[in-house]
Image: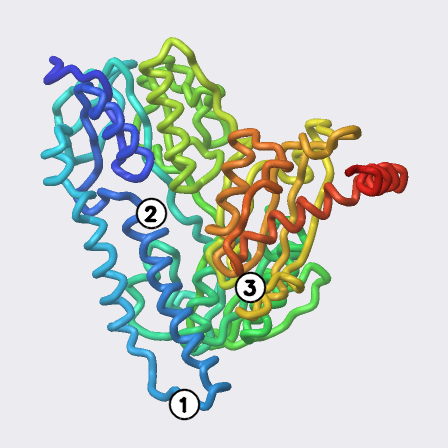
Amino acid sequence: MINKKYDLIVIGAGSGGLGASLGMQQMGMDVLLIDRNPENIGGECLNTGCVPSKALIHLGKQLHQAKLAKSLGLEVSGQVDIEKIKEYIKVKQESIKDHENITYLRKKGLDIELGEASFYSKDSIKIDGKIFQGRNIVIATGSSPRIITIPGAESLPKFTNESIFEIDFIPKNFVFIGAGPVSLELGQAFSRLGSKVSIIDRGDRILKKEDPKISTILQDRLEKENIQCFFNTEVSKVKGKCAILKKNSGEEESIPVDAIFMGLGRTLNFDSLALEKAGIKTEKGKIILNEKLQTTNKQVYVSGDAADNLKFSHAAEMHNMLLINNFLSPFKKKLDFDHFPWVTFTDPEVATFGQNEAQLKEKGINYERLETNFREDDRAVTDNFEYGNLIVFIEKKRFNPGNAKILGGSMIAPNAGEITQELVLAGVAGIIISTFMNKIYAYPTAANIHKSLLREKMVSQLKPWMKEIIKKWYRLKE
């Protein structure tokens, strides 16, 4: 017996689920939102991801800047109080939870059910003995951190992003396994809180999805803060308070360890959903999806991490914009990551947007790579980040380079995530690079680096004969 019918049922109240459910409810639809417990509202981003990590990074940056003030004659003393750190993080989370909690969402008009959900049929969900039918269903069950077993590490404190914000001490020697964004962000933060941080990775560099030039600059900055990186290496075992590192060459090295953080990627969360009852097929542990985020059951879609493409909160936003459009509009859209941006919130930040060089080559797109550093950028000089770097990929235009559009790029600099936003917009809107020449940048702002790079490109296209014509015209005119 069906307890109630809905226009949309959403399983999971994280970034993917909240966006889909609220978006459809605001369009006048009857929506049911399901999650296991009220503490899950807001999902990983609010509870164990973006929000607490950025609060921790902010505090780490304050401490780092205070220490740098020694060069001005100030003295910094005392020990970091981990409880005050945690209190600050909780306060910031609670502020955001004011609009991400059951009471608030129900006032908005959402029906909410708490408990373990599973498919009952192709268009219905069972939860605690009740059955709800949906015209469409969205799976937004997120992901969980991957954990590995390390021989001998049983007695050591081990953390993932789901547990790190409950830590009650600052580890003296903190080993981070994995050299992706999460390990680097949190590793640098704990280094600034007082830990001796070591980054261990089986690959040959940090941030393997970034341009190697950008990764190298960031690694150099981290090493200047006494963060040690080990590549082509894994933690093979732990002996007492020592981590035994095994390199690809077979060599071993021992480093001190008091705690371990695992930043080894994510696993998907849908084992309890009984997907087979809804005719939803999987392959290699992933739900099979088309370019519209539609499963093999045409009434069921996926949003957020569960879609297993790009695991970012703003990827869930993009998913939901696509889903809501396709639910309500006759003009259907397909998933398109050509202008997708992301930021690694280390200090300096790494901001990447659009397509990278490998993708452009794979698609056979005719492009040019433009690159510059910040050594002659006046704001970088005053603020001490001349090490910064900007890479931009543009269309290759033989006869009129000013008509080229921005295809993608990367920047490493303080606040790179903010500085690059106009480049993201230019890519999305198809703004040609000559338009940047018409913009006056307030002086001195770091974003002027965009105009400097693009102007250099346009000037470089002037051939000697072109300059000669311009010179003659100038001298002949009245």
Residue where numbered disc 2 is placed: 45
Q: Give 255 or 72, whichever is nearer the viewer.
A: 72
For image coordinates 28% across by 63% down, the residue present is: 166
Horizontal side, residue 332 vs residue 37: left or right: right
For image coordinates 10% across by 34% down, the residue present is: 107
Q: Position of residue 277 (x, y in %)?
A: 31, 18
> Which one is closest to the eye, mark 3 or mark 2?
3
Which image quarter holds the N terminus? top left
Count neighbours of disc 3 (C-alpha within 10 A) and say few if under 14, some if 14 to 19, many if 20 or more: some
Q: How is the image coloured?
A: rainbow
Q: Position of residue 279 (x, y in %)?
A: 37, 15
Alpha carbon distance from label 3 to label 1: 27 Å
Alpha carbon distance from label 3 to label 2: 33 Å
Label 3 or label 1, whichever comes before in sequence order: 1
Residue where numbered disc 1 is placed: 75
Which image quarter holds the C terminus? top right
Above or below: residue 161 compared with residue 140: below
